[in-house]
Image: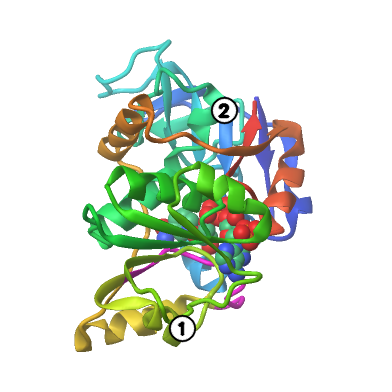
Amino acid sequence: MRAVVQDRYGSPDVLEVRDIGTPAPRRGEVLVRVFAAGVDPSVWHLMTGVPYLVRPFLGVRRPRNRVRGIDLAGRVEVVGPDVTRFRPGDDVFGTCDGSFAEYARARADRLAPKPPSLTFEKAAAVPVSACTALQALRDQGRVESGQQVLVIGAGGGVGTFAVQLAKAFGAVVTGVCSTAKIDLVRAIGADDVIDYTRDHFPDDTRRYDVILDIAGQRPMAQLRRALSDRGTLVFVGGEGGGRWLGGLDRSLLAVLKSPFGAQRMRMFIATSPVEDLQQLTGLVEAGKLIPVIDRTYPLSQAAEAVKYLAEGHVRGKIVLTV
Ligand SMILES: NC(=O)c1ccc[n+]([C@@H]2O[C@H](COP(=O)([O-])OP(=O)(O)OC[C@H]3O[C@@H](n4cnc5c(N)ncnc54)[C@H](OP(=O)(O)O)[C@@H]3O)[C@@H](O)[C@H]2O)c1
């Protein structure tokens, strides 16, 4: 089968499309014929091995798993031992380790039936980014109806889902994005938009119950000024935070100080359990969640897709078609 493989860490040039053996599903897994695979910043981190902090988990000198890609949408081809939820021919979406390939081995509990109303391309855009947005709002931010929510990085992969999910939870949503994305962020439901390239932010006139810090590595004092006295700041991500720690020092310090103040600071690593994929499917089918696709690339152009993502200004999601 064709797959996007890397033998060493580095820039997108390390990604090569090669013929490798088709994997066989193990206990609790299925083999999926991949039709589309989402691209998100985790692909860049796994490709570069940056921040270095994560290398003990990924492989110190080279990536332990050579095939890139996490998000997938496709059709179950083979069912492994102990899998009862799926049969060959089922259309699924979810996550695995190595989705930039014609076939991928995936844990059955990381997959759900594909939302019927979505194409494979749109379904492949959902798992990592929408599960992250869901867990940030529901589990970390504990967003309630009527609360003021600020989404920083509202025009990107996680942000476009976060704006829509916060609206679905009944919040009043303000998105922070660059000028080119103002219309998009309004169109997906934001009540208000702050253009971070022009507006002074925070302007000290409004405070938010929940802030999702998805992009920009803003100073802590600036974020806390925009947070209400008992509000919650959720660190989701943000690129450009240094090669060793990737900005983790900033959020970790804030989380460690959190118990000593009334404002709550939270950080987390998202997962994509079947229950969350099903909750997202319900929202998609109710018309409350629509994946925003910026560009699609064929599998053979995976390196170009990652280069575009690494420029840092993607509009919604990028997807590879296989
Ligand atoms: N904690 C977790 O488990 C988890 C899970 C998924 C992702 N993440 C992390 O979350 C971050 C975002 O992921 P993503 O998939 O949304 O990335 P993405 O698709 O690349 O989107 C990032 C967005 O941020 C915007 N942006 C860039 N600089 C900004 C700034 N200074 N202020 C405000 N917005 C800015 C960009 O657009 P404009 O600048 O044009 O507005 C872009 O739309 C990444 O660092 C990723 O690694 C963490």
Q: Which three-letter amino acid code belongs to the residue tagged 1?
A: Gln
The answer to whether residue 124 shows anywhere in this view is yes
Q: Is the CB of mark 1 within 8 Å of ligand 1?
A: no
Q: Secondary structure at mark 2?
A: helix
Q: Quadrant of the C terminus?
A: top right
**Viewer-proximal residue, 109 or 225?**
225
- Name the residue furthest front: 205
Q: Is residue 20 above or below residue 135?
A: above
Ligand 1 in which quarter = bottom right
**Which region of the structure is painted magenta?**
233-244
- In the image, taking residue 170 as reference, residue 54 lies left or right, namely right
Q: Which mark is residue 222?
A: 1
Which residue is pictured at 41% across the width and 35% down the height? 289
Q: Earlier in the sequence, mark 2 or mark 1?
A: 2
Q: Which three-letter amino acid code belongs to the residue tagged 2?
A: Glu
Which residue is pictured at 72% across the width and 60% down the height? 10
Which residue is pictured at 47% across the width and 26% down the height? 24
Which residue is pictured at 60% across the width and 78% down the height? 242
**Viewer-proximal residue, 268 or 287?**
287
Q: Which residue is mark 2?
A: 121
Coloring scheme used: rainbow
Q: Quadrant of the N terminus?
A: top right
Q: Secondary structure at mark 1?
A: helix
Q: Is residue 252 above or below residue 85?
A: below
Image-quadrant location for residue 62: bottom right
Image-quadrant location for residue 260: bottom left
- Name the residue furthest top: 89
- In the image, taking residue 50 as reference, residue 106 lies left or right, namely left
